């Protein structure tokens, strides 16, 4: 976009499900600069054209994940998306797909966070290291750089929901945990401080679980933090199959011994 072409048309999806309003698009003419983000444009429209526009945002620096929406057909963070990079004079903002809609661009994340919570996204470790001299004094659980690298990229997830919105399996199966929850399951499985993998495997190894992923890769394509959920899911599948084979082998040995 050149400096002379400094106005764009902002089309915003509008509806209020609590009042049963019919969905529509409202249009606003917004003056922009090279550095203007979609969030800047939306806040401009809200401040000077229509204060009733409903939008969720917070940090404005791609850290909180609050301003996720569909921009020109693709899930993105509004604060991280510059209008000049979209190469279009018409910017269309819609609520994220695969989420229940509340009002305008605001969606309900209750189900998304329920899936995240279900996989118990925290370190399970009963063998807490202690000082040899005093078993009551806890000490730091040290990790090598190589051990950290195994899960580091997956720890960058900000729970923005873009991967969940882009996932075709989520669109057809509301019970599917989604790429965010599954990649976080791998994040803790790959962490050598954690020993809760068998518990998590029982959660995700079922008919609506990890095997519903068809490896479309859409989740990784839209992640604003460079996380590769599709990779995490495939690695988790491989590890799960390896554990299953190992358990079956042990079971066969025990059967022969009996």
Image (cartoon, rainbow, N blue to C red):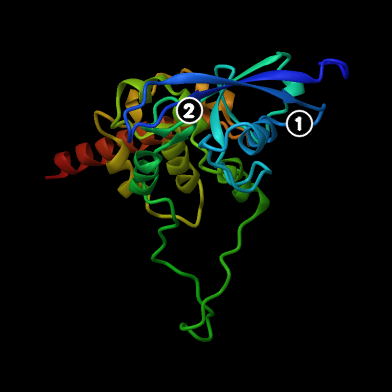
Q: Position of residue 133 (x, y in %)?
A: 53, 86
Q: Position of residue 141 (x, y in %)?
A: 56, 65
Tell me if mark 1 has few (under 14), some (14-19) or many (20+) residues whose alpha carbon lies within 10 angstroms of its own. Answer: some
Q: Residue furthest right?
A: 3
Observer-nearest residue: 201 or 4?
4
Q: In the figure, 26 relative to 129: above or below?
A: above
Q: Residue furthest bottom?
A: 134
Q: Position of residue 84 (x, y in %)?
A: 77, 22
Q: Earlier in the sequence, mark 1 or mark 2?
A: 1
Describe residue 192's horizontal placement relative to residue 119 as left or right: right
Q: Residue at x 48, y 28 (%)?
A: 95
Name the quadrant of the C terminus.
Answer: top left
Observer-nearest residue: 122 or 23?
23
Q: What is the number of the mark on residue 9?
A: none
Q: Position of residue 233 (x, y in %)?
A: 45, 31
Residue 174 visible in image: yes
Q: Residue at x 49, y 57 (%)?
A: 193
Q: What is the number of the mark on residue 36?
A: 1
Q: Regarding mark 1 in the picture, which secondary structure is present there?
A: loop
Residues at marks 1 and 2, CA–CA distance in whole angstroms: 20 Å
Quarter-wise, where is residue 100 in the image? top left
Observer-nearest residue: 195 or 45?
45
Residue identifier under label 2: 95
Residue 217 visible in image: no
Q: In the figure, 252 relative to 73: above or below?
A: below
Observer-nearest residue: 156 or 244?
156
Describe residue 13's horizontal placement relative to residue 1 as left or right: left
Q: Regarding mark 2 in the picture, which secondary structure is present there?
A: loop
Q: In the figure, 90 relative to 36: above or below?
A: above
């Amino acid at each position: 976009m050149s400096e002379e072409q400094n106005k764009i048309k902002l089309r915003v999806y509008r509806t209020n499900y609590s009042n049963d309003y019919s969905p529509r698009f409202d249009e606003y003419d917004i003056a922009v600069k090279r550095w203007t983000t979609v969030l800047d444009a939306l806040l401009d429209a809200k401040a000077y054209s229509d204060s009733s526009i409903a939008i969720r945002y917070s940090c404005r620096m791609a850290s909180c994940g609050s301003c996720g929406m569909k921009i020109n057909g693709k899930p993105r963070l509004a604060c991280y998306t510059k209008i000049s990079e979209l190469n279009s004079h018409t910017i269309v903002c819609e609520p994220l797909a695969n989420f229940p809609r509340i009002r305008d661009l605001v969606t309900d994340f209750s189900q998304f966070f329920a899936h995240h919570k279900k996989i118990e996204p925290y370190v399970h470790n009963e063998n807490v290291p202690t000082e040899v001299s005093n078993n009551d004094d806890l000490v730091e659980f040290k990790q090598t750089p190589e051990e950290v690298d195994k899960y580091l990229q997956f720890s960058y997830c900000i729970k923005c929901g873009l991967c969940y919105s882009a996932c075709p399996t989520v669109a057809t199966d509301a019970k599917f945990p989604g790429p965010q929850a599954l990649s976080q399951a791998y994040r803790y499985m790959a962490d050598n401080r954690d020993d809760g993998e068998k518990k998590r495997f029982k959660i995700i190894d079922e008919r609506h679980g990890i095997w519903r992923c068809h490896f479309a890769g859409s989740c990784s394509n839209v992640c604003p933090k460079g996380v590769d959920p599709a990779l995490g899911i495939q690695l988790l599948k491989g590890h799960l199959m390896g554990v299953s084979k190992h358990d079956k082998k042990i079971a066969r040995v025990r059967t022969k011994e009996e």
